Amino acid sequence: MTNRKDDHIKYALKYQSPYNAFDDMELIHHSLPSYDVADIDLSTHFAGQDFEFPCYINAMTGGSQKGKAVNEKLAKVAAATGIVMVTGSYSAALKNPNDASYRLHEVAEGLKLATNIGLDKPVERGQQTVKEMNPLFLQVHVNVMQELLMPEGERVFRTWKQHLADYVSQIRVPIILKEVGFGMDVSTIKIAHELGIQTFDISGRGGTSFAYIENQRGLDRSYLNDWGQTTVQCLLNAQGLLDHVEILASGGVRHPLDMIKCLVLGARAVGLSRTVLELVEKYPVERVIDIVNGWKEDLKLIMCALDCRTIQDLRQVDYLLYGRLYQANH
């Protein structure tokens, strides 16, 4: 029997989304900038903390030898570039105390590390995770469609809201509520905000598709491969909430221009999963470090061409929508 976590890596790399909504959004160029490239400030703030860069490596894997190898490479990249890394769901380590795939400080000194757990887990599991990992923050993921598509998946969901309230009141580190690639809707954000959640990773469709992954592993329900909303659409839907909550964006982000588009639409920071997974599978760690450091420079160049000195300034940038995005928003 193959390891489920290894299946996830394999099929995540195999999947190519037929549509990426970032291509239907165009930023309005500014021909007369007010700043030098050296003036541009990439720092951001979310989950009660300041971060030097507005991007992070998002939750992917752990819980297997393959997962350990991938996590160690990602950790080395994150530590060398100064960006945050979030491990995949810690549930595998909760089941197996000997699991070493999340022990990453040993391989990457100075690593800024966060971790992840599913909302199906009661708060005691979350407390154990925080105690063992001491993360900068805890991502709590909601993955209802993935669970429904897994033959071994969860079928009990009534407890989730109570679990979330418990996490807010009993976990000592900041909590981020995270989708897993289906896109978080406005009503969910409002409900969770009322329960005390301040920071949300809306994680839209366009990147890793857990519907596709689970369809490869089990029963074929390929008609659900495109379930959910794209990252750009989720950000557009959430415009009215940006002054009340902190929005992070992930899902289908391929390069610095996609990152900037998320920041223009109000995201505080942008998570990358598959894009970085592909890089560490394809290139040596040193090369990936150079690529990620190159992204930081590219972000500054694009911000200069948009006449923006700070991440906050990007919210003033005008943009055009085309195709499906235009149809859905007009």
Image (tube, rainbow, N blue to C red):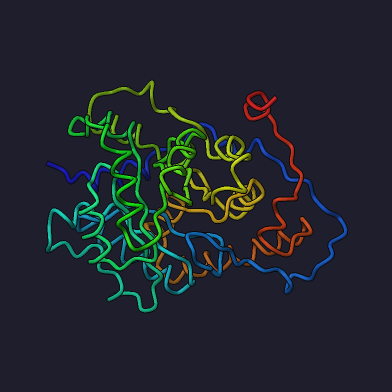
Q: Looking at the rendering, which quadrant does residue 162 occupy? A: top left
Q: Is residue 131 left or right of residue 192?
A: left
User: Residue 215 placed where, x, y %?
Assistant: 29, 29
Image quarter for residue 76? bottom left
Residue at x 25%, y 68% (from the top left corner):
103
Residue 13's spot in the image, x, y percent?
37, 45
50 and 102: which one is in front? Answer: 50
Estimate the x, y position of residue 205 in percent, counting from the top left: 47, 36
Q: Which one is nearer the viewer's eye here, 303 or 47?
A: 47
Quadrant housing the C terminus: top right
Q: Is residue 170 above or below residue 4?
A: below
- Write the residue at 52% across / 65% down: 292
In the picture as drawn, the residue positioned furthest to the right comes out as 32
Residue ranking furthest to the bottom: 109
The spot of residue 222 in percent (x, y) is 35, 24
Q: Residue at x 34, y 46 (%)?
A: 165
Q: Quadrant of residue 114?
A: bottom left
From the viewer's perspective, is residue 58 above or below residue 220? Answer: below
Placement of the N terminus among the 4 image quadrants: top left
Q: Of residues 10 and 206, which is closer to you in this image?
A: 206
Judge from the rendering whether residue 227 lies leftward or rightward of residue 61; answer left or right.
right
Answer left or right for 103 relative to 276: left
